[in-house]
Image (cartoon, rainbow, N blue to C red):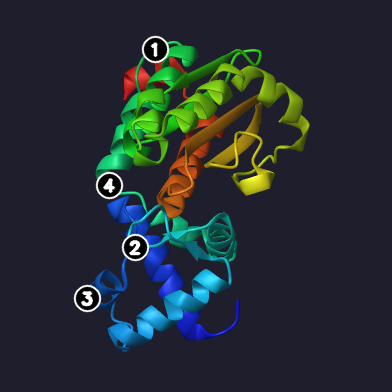
Amino acid sequence: MTGERKKKVLNAIIREHIYTKSPVGSGAISEKYNLDVSSATIRNVMGQLEEDGYITQPYTSAGRVPTVKAYKEYVYKLSQSSGEEFGKQLKQKERRFIDEAFNADKDKELIYKDAAKAMAEISDAAIFWAFHQYNMYYTGISNLISQPEFSQRELIYDISSIIDRMDEIVNENFENFSDSPQILIGEDNPFGIFCGTIITKYKIRNRQGLLGILAPLRMDYKKNYALINYVLKHITRKPISKNKHKNK
């Protein structure tokens, strides 16, 4: 995409759509984002963005929503940002929520399940985790199907079929997934073109695991990327012995 004004308007549309879960109009962009241009100019830019395939009009709504093409460009920009910028997206209480799950005196599998539930609550998305011989555990499915994007019957069927085939999809694509967090969108996403996925493989003592966040395209990529990185640090840190823990 060329033109700083187009980039700023598109970025504002994406941020507003992530926040409101609704189509975005030029008035909202003009009121909430300091772009130093008139509403008429924003309408013109939105018209250009629609012609370029970055936004589209759902049904008869007056607002616009970002397309897969828009999210791909948005995520590409995020991938060029520093790790510190991503890390700042998690609030202290969210980090503490994850810390409490990992610091519990439980078996590792129960700790991971509690951490997955915490991730689902923080992200408002579905979490899938292969942590024991690739035996898939997932939680937060109700978060996923309750999103406005899946209010149509055919999309509920589509996302349900993805969940039913989760183990199969992971097994078929496991070797293609990265050993560090990656964002999959559109045709690059084996979990459905109507979803966004943040996923990573990891290895502990020669055993591989896999962790992923599944959400609508309209997910908070900054926050969820930070979330999966934060959890990954917990997973791969050296364990503290129980005796040492009790003496503290």
Query: Which image quadrant is residue 88 in?
Result: bottom left
**Alpha-carbon distance for marks 2 and 1?**
49 Å
Graded by Cα atoms within 10 Å as few (under 14), some (14 to 19) or many (20 or more), the crowding at tag 1 reads few
Query: Relative to the observer, which residue lies in front, 168 or 180?
Result: 168
SS category of the residue bearing label 2? loop
**Closer to the camera: disc 4 or disc 3?**
3
What residue sits 70% from the left and 37% below the top? 177
* Residue beneath disc 4: 92
Quadrant location, the N terminus:
bottom right
Tell me if residue 205 can be seen: no
Q: Earlier in the sequence, mark 4 or mark 3?
A: 3
Graded by Cα atoms within 10 Å as few (under 14), some (14 to 19) or many (20 or more), the crowding at tag 2 reads many
Q: Earlier in the sequence, mark 2 or mark 1?
A: 2
SS category of the residue bearing label 1? loop
Q: Earlier in the sequence, mark 2 or mark 3?
A: 3
What residue sits 46% from the left and 84% below the top? 5
* Residue beneath disc 2: 63
* Residue beneath disc 3: 31
